[in-house]
Amino acid sequence: MSQQMVIIGAGLAGLSAACTAARQGWQVWLCSSLPSERAQSVMAEGGINAALDTQGQEDSPARHGADTLRAACGLADPNAVLAMTAAASALVEELADLGVPFNRTADGQIDLRYFGGQKKKRTAFSQSDTGKQLMTALIDAVRRYEAEGTVHRLNHHDFLTLLHDGPVCTGASLRDTWNGESCDLPAQAVIIASGGLHGLFSCTTGSLADTGAVTAELFRLGLPVANGEFIQYHPTTIASNGKRMLVSEAARGEGGRLWVKKQGRPWYFMEEKYPELGNLMPRDVTAREIWYHCQAGETVWLDLTGLEEDIFFRKLSGLVADCLLYGGVDIRCQPIAVAPGIHYFMGGLYVDEWHRTPWKHLYAAGECACQYHGANRLGGNSLLGAIYGGRKAACTAIEEGKERPLPRTGQPELPPAALPPAGLACLRQHLDRALGVVRSGAVLAQALDSIAALPGALPLLGQALLQSAQGRQESRGAHWRSDFPHRDDDRFLRTTLALYDGRRITLSYRPVPEKRG
């Protein structure tokens, strides 16, 4: 009988893992609360990084890796990062073969654009809708295995809890949201690909359907969360329907400029303060600069009016349409006011280089896991990390579970009741305030006191994020403390681990792996 794998989440990481496992003959249960077409991955706009070097820039996977590690401020595993960047070019070519309509140059090569924190053009893109195009191709690829009966879709199914025997995963317990019935799925391996923690916040560009409930339940069970304090704010977002809408970094990659009014004229502050990369500094730096201006009561403008019409038509048409529809601004003719908004969670479930959690036969990939980005993510690396990470997790699971018999499962311990809407609103309010672009110990402590009495697993996870930020008494990457404004490598060149033992949350710090060879 074929080995069985349960995958929680049907975005890019989940689909990539499903394809990998099905290709090896495993029976895959692909479980999600919403269909793939509504996954967070669809919302990604700018592109996917790979050192294709189609434009003669003398780029290489090693340089891509070096840029990634530099942006990570010392907290990314160099072995994992360099393996990912080494695989990136072939992965992008595979995606093109699957039918992803990447923009092409006049001679038919995959076109590349600049993205923040990188001196080379290495971001392959499909207009400003890259995530949607990648998802379409991978959904189609998985449907082949669905037709063969290798992949079994379980849409509209919420994750309830893990089936486990101590620290050994034996499957997953789910609930059908249409009829309320629960079911237990025993499996030789479980991969968590449930996305980020956007539902814990309101100041976010992400889907609030990514509630964070899966990570919260695993944290409640005793799985550690790593680097929870590192939350990336995208520098350029606009208000939309009570949250934030992304104005893609592709806008600046194609020549968009940031300015504030100074003495009645535009002052291009990023170009003056950072002449080497200007508007394409890493996201943590750019977000802080914009935040400081906003705090001073100034309006920050993103100006694309100097771009050629052909760029809007061939490369930014989706962004033009979104800004017109949701912001009421035609960015071809006038600048748009922007401010930072939460966009990505570098931290998440702790995994090693092979995407193993500390529990046997349990793996995690994509934004729910802590791998590849350290203290700050390069734009274009999230799509790469999700697809590569999903594949890596599946390969590890296949190798470690291939001789394992299907485990027996007992009655699962059901999680506590969900946080009521009023409690969730309270949690979001305090996390938005305390885990902003710039933090302080006093505000973090106040938020911890305010949410301490909230019931359920989500506030528990919120406490872990706050305690992780409180414990890191330095400024590094996306974590910036006004009361500790300097980087402290002697104390904090380490990965933060938050662990719940059933009574309280404790913090510890683990050294970052050294580069092999």
Image (tube, rainbow, N blue to C red):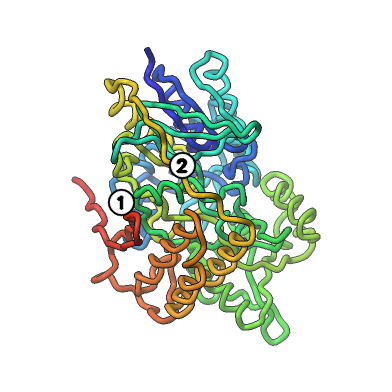
Dot 1 amino acid type = Asp
Q: Residues within 10 Å of mark 2 (few under 14, many from 20)?
A: few
Quick check: can you spot residue 267? yes
Give the x, y percent position of residue 402: 30, 22
Residue placed most toward the observer, 121 or 424: 424
Q: Which residue is mark 2?
A: 414
Could you tell me how far apart the alpha carbons at marks 2 and 1 are, in whole angstroms? 35 Å
Looking at the rendered structure, the number of numbered marks drawn on it comes to 2
Q: Is residue 108 left or right of residue 168?
A: right
Chain-order first, disc 2 or disc 1: 1
Q: Which SS class for mark 1?
A: loop
Question: Residue visible at 51% across and 48% down?
Answer: 213
Q: Which mark is residue 77?
A: 1
Question: Residue visible at 61% across and 34% down?
Answer: 180
Question: Residue visible at 43% across and 62% down?
Answer: 465
Locate the N terminus by quadrant: top left
Locate the C terminus by quadrant: top left
Question: Residue visible at 43% across and 76% down?
Answer: 481
